[in-house]
Structure formats: C-alpha cells, structure tokens
C-alpha cells in the first residue's frame, strides 16, 4: 500500500440531533461531548434507541447535527472515513475483488496503485483465494470480512462500525472480533464501534462509552485496562474481565430499564 495515514483525532462538542416525530420534536442525542485520540479503538454501548447509530451517522456525514460541532484532525491528510454496517452492503453483481476496489474506483485511484492495495487488503482479511467469488457464494462471516477489507483499502482516517458482527453466529463473531483487533493493531486506525454487547466492547476497545436512554447523553466513560495485543478468548475467561463487565452492566442497567419502560407506555 501507499504511505498509510495515521488515525484521526475526533473532537465532539455539544452535539445535539432532533427531528420531527409523530408527537412533536424528538431529541435523539443531546449535549454529547467526546474526544477520541488518534489510533484509539472506542466502543459505544447503550440501550436500544439511545442514539448510538445517530451519532455514528453524523460522524460519517450521513446525517447532520442540529447543533454542536465535530472537528476531525487527520494529521494533514484529507479527512476521510469508512463505515461498516450490520449488513455487509456488498454489491451482489460484483465479486469480492471489485467490491473491495469500489471505494478506490470512486476516488479515481489509478489501477497501478489500486491493484496492490486491493491485494494487500484481501490478504489482511484472508480472502485472497476468494477474490472471484460473488456475495451469494460467501458465508455471512466472509461477506463481513469483504466489507472490512473494502473499508480498510481506502486508508481512512477513521473507521466507523455499527454493530458489524451482530447478525453472525457466536463462533464467527469471535473469529471476526479477533481479526478486526489484529487489523487495528497493525494499522493504527481510529475506530468508533457501536455495539449492544458489553462483552464485545471490553474485548475490543480501549475505552467504553456508556450512553443514557433517549435522549442519548454520555453517562460514563470506562477505561479498559487490558493491554494489547489481546487473546480475546483468554481475556474473556479472566476474573478481571468478568468483574468489569458486571460493573458496566450496573451502570447501564438503569438506562436499559428506563428505555424499556418508555417504549411500553
């Protein structure tokens, strides 16, 4: 690949997003202040409907805040991001290679530069032998690996991930969690990762942001003390991991209960 950009620093101040609802204005997120360090793996957890995905979409430029500001410092590079959703979003008429190359083609990257970058991305996710396969020929895990390769190949300043492994079975989820952490450790990208799983947040992240029920605000930020590189299976079996998971659940439990009560009214 060409010279790799470092992960971007992100500064979020006073972020608010409201929109028109059936019974008036709805506030999705409010007073969100957050700093993400270059190369950090930041996980966000919270009850359903707390605005986690809204925050991610605003960071990606797919939605706009009502008020507040976002500043991204990509270290002198143009500010770019890549997003990976729960569904892979692959184009069914393209094979693995052309799906991965798509972002480079839209940026008019010359083929002489694009080809080695695609090759490197496919090797990173272990799909070099499947480059001619189409999405319908792949397992769910392989489709998500293709989506991750497509994200990494553009060399983004920040990688935004919205529950990318939620639809996978437990075994594939563990495999892809391990692979993503390995890729992150190799590339030093800034990752903002939304998940419903406390366990996933602790296995993968440097810090875990806990959000309140709607309107989503930051309730607490937990530093994850486990060093890298991580053996995710071994880590998940440790008593320290179990104790921290319980601590986060105690913080989150009130918000989950409140969100559930509001939906039942």
Image (cartoon, helix red, strand yellow):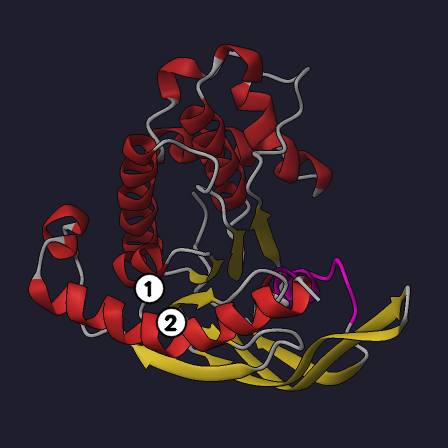
Quarter of the image containing the C terminus? bottom right
Report if residue 70 lies within the magenta region.
no
Q: Evaluate whether residue 142 shows in this view.
A: yes
**Range drawn in magenta:** 53-64
Q: CA distance from mark 2 to mark 1?
A: 7 Å
Q: Main secondary structure of the magenta part?
A: helix
Q: How many marks?
A: 2
Residue at 38% x, 69% y is: 40
**What percent of the width, then of the height, locates residue 232?**
19, 50
**What percent of the width, then of the height, locates residue 181?**
30, 51
**Residue named by callout 1:** 205
Front-most of residues 9 and 61: 61
Q: Does residue 9 appear left or right of residue 261 in this picture?
A: left
Report if residue 60 lies within the magenta region.
yes
Q: Does residue 136 appear left or right of residue 41 in this picture?
A: right
Quick one: label 1, few (<14), some, or many (20+) residues within 10 Å?
many
In this rendering, the label closer to the viewer, 2 or 1: 2
Give the structural element (helix, strand or loop) at label 2.
strand
Quick one: label 2, few (<14), some, or many (20+) residues within 10 Å?
many
Is 251 drawn above or below residue 232 in the view shown?
below
**What percent of the width, then of the height, locates residue 174?**
28, 40
Quarter of the image containing the N terminus? top left
Q: Does residue 211 appear left or right of residue 19 in this picture?
A: left
Residue at 72% x, 39% y is: 106
The quadrant where residue 248 appears: bottom left
Residue at 28% x, 56% y is: 185
Give the structural element (helix, strand or loop) at label 1.
loop
**What percent of the width, then of the height, locates residue 197?**
39, 55
Q: Does residue 237 appear left or right of residue 262 in this picture?
A: left
Query: Which numbered circle lies on residue 208?
Result: 2
Is 144 drawn above or below residue 2 in the view shown?
above
């Amino acid at each position: 690949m060409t010279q790799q950009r470092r992960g971007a620093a992100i500064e979020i101040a006073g972020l608010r997003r409201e929109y028109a609802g059936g019974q008036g204005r709805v506030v999705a997120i409010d007073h969100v202040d957050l700093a993400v360090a270059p190369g950090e793996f930041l996980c966000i957890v919270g009850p359903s409907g707390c605005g986690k995905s809204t925050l991610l979409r605003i960071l990606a430029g797919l939605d706009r805040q009502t008020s507040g500001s976002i500043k991204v410092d990509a270290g002198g590079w143009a500010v770019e991001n890549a997003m990976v959703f729960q569904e892979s979003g692959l184009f069914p008429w393209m094979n693995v290679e052309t799906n991965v190359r798509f972002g480079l083609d839209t940026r008019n990257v010359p083929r002489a530069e694009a080809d080695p970058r695609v090759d490197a991305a496919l090797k990173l996710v272990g799909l070099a032998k499947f480059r001619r396969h189409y999405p319908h020929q792949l397992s769910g895990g392989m489709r998500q690996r293709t989506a991750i390769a497509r994200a990494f190949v553009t060399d983004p300043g920040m990688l935004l991930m919205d529950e990318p492994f939620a639809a996978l079975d437990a075994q594939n989820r563990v495999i892809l969690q391990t692979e993503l952490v390995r890729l992150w450790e190799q590339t030093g990208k800034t990752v903002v990762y939304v998940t419903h799983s406390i366990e996933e947040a602790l296995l993968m992240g440097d810090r875990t942001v806990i959000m309140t029920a709607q309107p989503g605000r930051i309730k607490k930020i937990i530093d994850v003390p486990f060093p890298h590189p991580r053996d995710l299976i071994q880590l998940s079996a440790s008593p320290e991991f179990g104790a921290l998971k319980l601590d986060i659940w105690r913080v989150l439990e009130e918000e989950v209960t409140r969100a559930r009560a509001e939906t039942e009214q």
